[in-house]
Image (cartoon, rainbow, N blue to C red):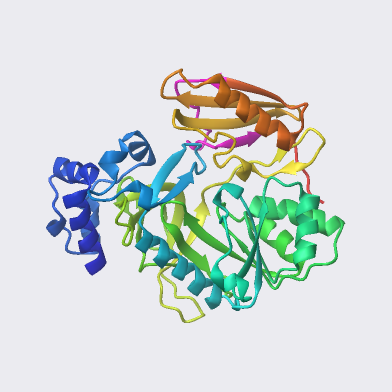
Amino acid sequence: MRKLHGMLHYAYDNVPFYHRKFSEAGVKPDDIRTLQDLVKIPTTTKSEIQQAPVSDLIARGIETSGCGENITSGSTGMPLVTYMDKNAIGLYSAVWIAVFQENGVRLRDKRAIIGEPRNFPKKKNLNEYIGIMRRKHISIFDDVQTQLNMLREYRPNIIEGYPSSLTILADAYHKRGGGLSPRLIFTLAEVLEKASRNFISSSFAADVLDYYGSSEFSLLAWECREHAGYHANADCAIMEFLKNGEVVADNERGEITCTSLVNHAMPLIRYCHGDIGISLKEKCPCGRTLPMMKVVEGRTDDFLTSVDGRIISPTLFFPYPFKNFANIRQFKVIQEQKNRIRIQLVVRDRSLSNEVLHEAIKEIRRVFGDAMQVEFEFLEELERDRSGKLKKVVSRVPVNFG
C-alpha cells in the first residue's frame, strides 16, 4: 500500500495523462485508502496509451534517452513503445534472477534463449566471462535445423523461448533427436496450451515451467515446480481481475489489469492487458505466500507455414517485420494459402511509405521463401472474431506436428 500510494501521488503530480484522468473522474490519490478503492480510478487501455503524445505519458524531468525502450504488439497487433527507468530495469532483472533460482537454476548453468533478436543484448555481462549465468541467444528467425545445431553445440542446461517456437523445435528434435539434455525449459510471451506443454516436456525429457509477463511490466507471475498455478509478483505490480469494470471473486474469470509499483519513467495505472485470468484463493503446496493466479486466455495465435512446408511461429510478428511502425495503429496477418499472406493495416494516415512496405515484404520472404506473395490491405478498423477478440495472426493452412 505504501508503494501504491507513492506511485499514485507521483503519477498525479508528474504525468499529465494521469493528472487529467484522475481529475476527469473526480479522484485524488488520497481517496485510495485500500486496494478495493482502486475501482474509483478509471482503467487505462492500450489504445489510449497508443494515441496519447509521449510527452503526456512520460513523467516530468525524465528523459527517454536515459530509459529502456520496450516494443510490444501483444495479441492484437497494436504496436506500442513504453519506457522504463533504470531503477525499474535493475529491480526487474533482480526479480528474474530470483525467480529462476527459486525454480532450480544454478549460477553456473548455461541458458539458451530463443527469441526476437531485436531484444538481444549487444555484449556479454561481466559475470558471463567468469562462467556465471551464461547465456546464448538464438534468433527465432533461424530455421529449426540451425537452432538445433546451435543448441547441440552449446549444450545448455536451460532452454527458454516462446511456446509456439519451442513446439516447432520439439517436433524437429522428436524426429531428429539426440544430443540435448536440458534440465529445465521455460516458456513465456504466449499462452502455454496443455498439449504443447506435454509435447515439449516429453520430447526433451525436461520439466516445463511457464512465465507470464509483458513488455510493459516485465515478469508478472510464474509457475513453480508444483505446477499449481502462477505466483504473482505482488511486490512489483498490483493485479486485478475485472468483468464489466468490477473486480470478480476468487476463482472467477476476469480481464487482467495491472498497476506498476516500480516504474517511475512511464507509470501505468489500472492498465488493461486484454488477457483473461483467474485469481486463485488456494495456496500453493510449495509454501510460498505470493498471491496465486492462472492465465486462461491470452496471446494465442495460429502457426504459419513457409512455402517449402516449414512451420513458422506466430511470434515472428512481434511486431516484426515493421521495423518503423510509428504510423501503424494496428495490423493483422492472415495466411490464405501456403504461398500467400495478406496483411491488414490500420494506419494513422495513408503516408505509410512504400519503402516500409517493401522492406516488410523482403523480410517476410527471407523467412517464408522468395515465392511468398505478400498483399497489404488498408482498413479503417479490423474485424473481430466471434469471441470479440482481435487475433494478430490467423492461418488457413492446416499444420500437423509429428
Task: Say which of 330 and 136 sits in front.
Answer: 136
Q: Is there any visible trace of residue 230 in the rendered image?
A: no
In the rendered view, tell whether residue 103 sits above or below residue 165. below
Image quadrant in which the N terminus is located: bottom left
Q: Is residue 8 left or right of residue 295?
A: left
Q: Quadrant of residue 187?
A: bottom right
| Residue that appears at 67% across and 33% down | 364
- Whether the magenta-drawn stretch holds residue 378 is answered as yes
Q: Which residues are magenta?
A: 377-395
Q: At 53% across and 33% down in the image, what residue appears?
A: 385
Q: Position of residue 200 (x, y in %)?
A: 72, 61
User: Which quadrant would residue 395 be assigned to in this image?
Assistant: top right
Residue 28, percent from left and from top: 13, 52
Q: How many marks?
A: 0
Position of residue 55 measured from the top left corner of the image (x, y, whole percent): 27, 40
Please, what is the dominant secondary structure of the magenta stretch?
A: loop
Q: Relative to residue 262, is residue 320 depicted above or below?
A: above
**In this image, 322 relative to 199: left or right?**
left
| Residue 197 percent across, percent down from the top left | 67, 60
Q: Is residue 125 above or below residue 376?
A: below
Foreground residue among 203 and 55: 55
Residue at image location 47% in from the left, 82% down from the top: 287
- The image quadrant of residue 20 is top left
Q: Is residue 157 visible?
A: yes
Residue furthest to the top: 350
Q: Judge left or right: residue 3 versus residue 75.
A: left
Q: Nearer the viewer, residue 71 or 20?
A: 71
Q: Is residue 102 left or right of residue 170?
A: left
Queried whether the magenta region covers residue 50, the answer comes back as no
